[in-house]
Image (spheres, rainbow, N blue to C red):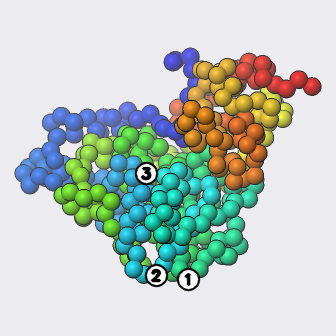
């Protein structure tokens, strides 16, 4: 695959060498169970707590507010079902979410609606932004929770979370923010966002797969959750299960590494992303960039090619790793719900590709990718 170009960093990232080096001892000589009372266990527990403290400090919260999970999907499920169970007797039965949320939000909401919860999806404008007025109209005295992600995984569009969270708090509602795609790409300081719950996943910022975290506010207000997993009372009773110490250590190392040059690296990636965009617009003048009128992640390009199917483009450019706009993995994919919510037609949504650059993407990579894509687009470009 050396001749290929990987432009799908929003899907996952490679583990940094420094991260792998930090993890290795905890697979071998420092293999203790963090819940065991002996020296090996205490060594593992110390590593876990050091990681928890490091992550918390970077995010601007306390270590007691961080719960380790297997990733963002589990964290979001824990937040949604845990909040619903904990506040079931309060009379607040309404949950709001942006229509462009990840399936790890939307699918649990469908289950909760079958259990009697009132769920409502908020519309977005043509750039994928939630309107403050739309949220204000949707908020009620019975609203328990509002769920809006910081940066969209498909378009990279960044929401004005602090303003949205403040509005939710004015009616006594809690605010859950999926920060998975934003962490490691832009500075994220949770107190500035004013959210009550947030999630992250290490494999999105050059850490290992299988480890993430859930932030749960402990003061002003203190947020209560019921556990999703039972059996041992780990993580202060909120998430039972033997802690994967090597992965937790890896997440800490990854966050520390990407934080060292985050501003400079983000600016570099934005330049490379824009070079790719300009090149594609030159190759295919009918193309349109989705979400371009809103703040976006510096590494993400969501672009439609009217008259050409995204799957056909990728089939003709197999050495370019990118993602289609589809969020479905069935044999007959549906068009992206994110793009449909932004007003794109199903046909245009199916013509859309997401490119996401990363720390190892170079200008040379972009030129190689454009050459591959040019051949693909030449064959698919509408005649006349």
3D distance between C-alphas at marks 1 and 2 = 9 Å
For the residue labelled by badge 3, is the local secondary structure a helix, a strand or a loop? helix
Residue drawn at (40%, 35%) of the image: 15
Mark positioned earlier in the residue sequence (1 or 2): 2
Residue drawn at (29%, 39%) of the image: 22
Crowd class of label 1 (few under 14; some 14 to 19; many from 20; radius 10 Å) = few
3D distance between C-alphas at marks 2 and 3 = 28 Å
* Residue nearer the viewer, 122 or 261: 122
Mark positioned earlier in the residue sequence (2 or 3): 3
Q: In the rendering, which numbered label is found on residue 141? A: 1
**209 sits to left or right of 141:** left
3D distance between C-alphas at marks 3 and 1 = 29 Å
Residue drawn at (22%, 36%) of the image: 27
Residue 273 visible in the picture: no
* Residue nearer the viewer, 65 or 366: 65
**306 sits to left or right of 242:** right
Crowd class of label 2 (few under 14; some 14 to 19; many from 20; radius 10 Å) = few
Give how far across and how far down residue 235 sits, in percent.
Answer: 26, 60
Give how far across and how far down residue 11 sits, in percent.
Answer: 52, 39
Q: In the rendering, which numbered label is found on residue 12? A: none
Say if 284 sits above or below 163 in the image.
above
Residue 232 visible in the picture: yes
Q: In the rendering, which numbered label is found on residue 91? A: 2
Q: Which residue is disc 3 drawn over?
A: 72
Give how far across and how far down residue 109 sits, in percent.
Answer: 50, 60
């Amino acid at each position: 695959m050396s001749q290929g170009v990987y432009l799908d960093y929003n899907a996952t990232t490679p583990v940094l060498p420094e991260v792998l080096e930090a993890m290795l001892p905890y697979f071998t000589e420092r293999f203790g169970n963090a819940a065991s009372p002996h020296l090996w266990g205490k060594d593992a527990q110390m590593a876990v707590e050091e990681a928890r403290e490091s992550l918390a400090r970077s995010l601007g919260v306390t270590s007691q507010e961080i719960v380790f999970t297997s990733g963002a999907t589990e964290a979001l499920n824990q937040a949604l079902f845990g909040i619903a169970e904990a506040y079931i007797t309060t009379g607040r039965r309404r949950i709001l979410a942006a229509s462009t949320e990840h399936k790890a939000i939307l699918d649990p909401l469908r289950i909760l609606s079958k259990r009697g919860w009132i769920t409502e999806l908020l519309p977005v404008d043509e750039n994928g932004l939630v309107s403050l007025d739309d949220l204000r109209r949707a908020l009620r005295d019975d609203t328990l929770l509002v769920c809006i992600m910081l940066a969209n995984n498909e378009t990279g569009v960044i929401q004005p979370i602090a303003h949205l969270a403040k509005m939710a708090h004015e009616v006594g509602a809690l605010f859950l923010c999926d920060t998975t795609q934003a962490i490691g790409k832009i500075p994220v300081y949770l107190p500035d966002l004013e959210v009550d719950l947030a999630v992250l996943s290490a494999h999105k910022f050059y850490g290992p797969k299988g480890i993430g975290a859930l932030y749960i506010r402990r003061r002003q207000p203190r947020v209560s959750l019921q556990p999703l997993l039972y059996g041992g009372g780990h993580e202060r009773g909120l998430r039972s299960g033997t802690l994967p110490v090597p992965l937790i250590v890896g997440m800490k190392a990854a966050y520390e590494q990407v934080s060292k040059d985050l501003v400079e690296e983000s600016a570099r990636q934005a330049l490379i992303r824009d070079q790719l965009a300009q090149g594609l617009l030159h190759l295919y003048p009918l193309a349109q960039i989705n979400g371009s009128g809103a703040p976006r992640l510096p590494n993400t390009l969501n672009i439609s090619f009217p008259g050409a199917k995204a799957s056909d483009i990728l089939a003709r450019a197999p050495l370019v790793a990118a993602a289609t706009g589809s969020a479905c993995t069935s044999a007959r994919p549906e068009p992206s719900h994110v793009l449909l919510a932004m007003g794109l037609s199903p046909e245009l949504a199916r013509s859309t590709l997401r490119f996401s650059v990363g720390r190892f993407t170079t200008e040379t990579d972009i030129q190689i990718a454009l050459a591959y894509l040019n051949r693909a687009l030449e064959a698919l470009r509408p005649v006349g």
